[in-house]
Image: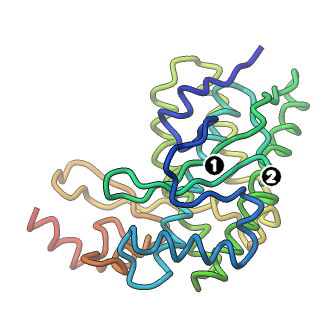
């Protein structure tokens, strides 16, 4: 029977089954859709990232949501099972590690949902797991986050594919089990190319993006991916456009390579 390795999850994703000590803020995930609670999260997290306004809070928190979703993707493909991803089954914890504000996602009911046997049944199961996560969990949180930070829904959803494209390639390269490797490729293809855009409440599936490559900062023989959307790091104290930011001009990127 498929089994979730919770220690592996905790070590590689912000997913935990035990409450953290000394958290700054803790909300059950379904409480975050309340504007007052989301506003409190935004105001508490903003100084931890030295944000000049609320907008970087939106992109940074969506990066953490992306890490949760990536853990979900890993469970489905590598272990062929999932968890209950409904909002009410999760608590969002904000804590400080050193001087850095971080998030953890605490799972309450850890009962495993194992994929059924047979390709057709599993494909249907897989789609249902994606719908529960993105339509019923991530979408309402992103909508509340958009209202609280002033970010467009597009820039918030756009934080997820950059993380996925990088780590999914890493997972496919490092997973030894050929069946798990094949599922990683097939499940990710379905997420990006076949899952309906209405699941995300967007005119287009936000994972269905074209990857753009640029010369590595220090090694001209290597290529690195451009981010799908700006993370708004430049809107934090001392921040600037990242080398892989899509807003950075190519002439500025060339100058960064020269300096490096």
Q: How is the image coloured?
A: rainbow
Q: Nearer the viewer, mark 2 or mark 1?
A: 2
Q: Work out whether 7 lies above or below 64.
A: above
The quadrant of the image that shows the C terminus is: bottom left
Residue 246 rendering spot, x and y as whole percentages: 40, 73
> In the image, which disc is placed on residue 69?
1
Residue 166 rendering spot, x and y as whole percentages: 45, 47
Q: Work out whether 36 lies above or below 91.
A: below
Residue 14 rendering spot, x and y as whole percentages: 54, 44
Q: Work out whether 160 lies above or below 120.
A: below
Q: Which residue is mark 2?
A: 88
The quadrant of the image that shows the N terminus is: top right
Q: CA distance from mark 2 to mark 1?
A: 16 Å
Residue depicted at x 68% and y 72%:
37
Residue depicted at x 36% and y 58%:
100
Position of residue 57 in the picture relative to residue 225 (left or right): right
> In the image, which disc is placed on residue 254?
none
* Residue toward you, 231 or 60: 60
Which residue ends up furthest to the front in the rendered image? 22
Q: How would you rate the neighbour count of disc 2 (Cα within 10 Å): few for under 14, some for 14-19, many for 20 or more?
A: some
Position of residue 72 in the picture relative to residue 240 (left or right): right
């Amino acid at each position: 029977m498929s089994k979730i390795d919770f220690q592996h999850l905790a070590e590689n994703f912000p997913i935990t089954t035990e409450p953290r000590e000394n958290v700054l803020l803790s909300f059950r995930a379904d409480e975050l859709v309340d504007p007052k609670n989301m506003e409190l999260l935004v105001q508490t997290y903003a100084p931890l990232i030295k944000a000049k306004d609320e907008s970087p809070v939106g992109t940074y928190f969506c990066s953490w949501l992306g890490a949760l979703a990536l853990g979900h993707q890993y469970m489905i493909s590598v272990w062929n099972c999932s968890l209950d991803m409904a909002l009410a089954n999760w608590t969002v914890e904000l804590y400080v590690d050193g001087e850095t504000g971080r998030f953890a996602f605490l799972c309450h009911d850890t009962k495993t949902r194992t994929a059924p046997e047979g390709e057709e049944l599993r494909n249907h199961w897989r789609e249902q797991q994606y719908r529960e996560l993105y339509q019923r969990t991530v979408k309402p949180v992103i909508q509340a986050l958009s209202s609280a930070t002033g970010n467009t829904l597009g820039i918030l959803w756009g934080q997820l594919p950059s993380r996925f494209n990088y780590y999914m390639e890493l997972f496919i390269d490092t997973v030894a089990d050929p069946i798990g490797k094949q599922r990683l490729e097939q499940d990710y293809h379905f997420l990006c190319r076949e899952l309906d855009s209405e699941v995300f409440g967007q005119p287009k599936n936000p994972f269905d993006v074209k990857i753009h490559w640029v010369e590595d900062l220090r090694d001209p023989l290597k290529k690195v991916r451009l981010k799908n959307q700006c993370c708004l790091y430049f809107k934090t104290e001392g921040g600037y456009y990242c080398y892989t930011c899509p807003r950075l001009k190519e002439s500025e990127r060339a100058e960064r390579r020269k300096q490096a």
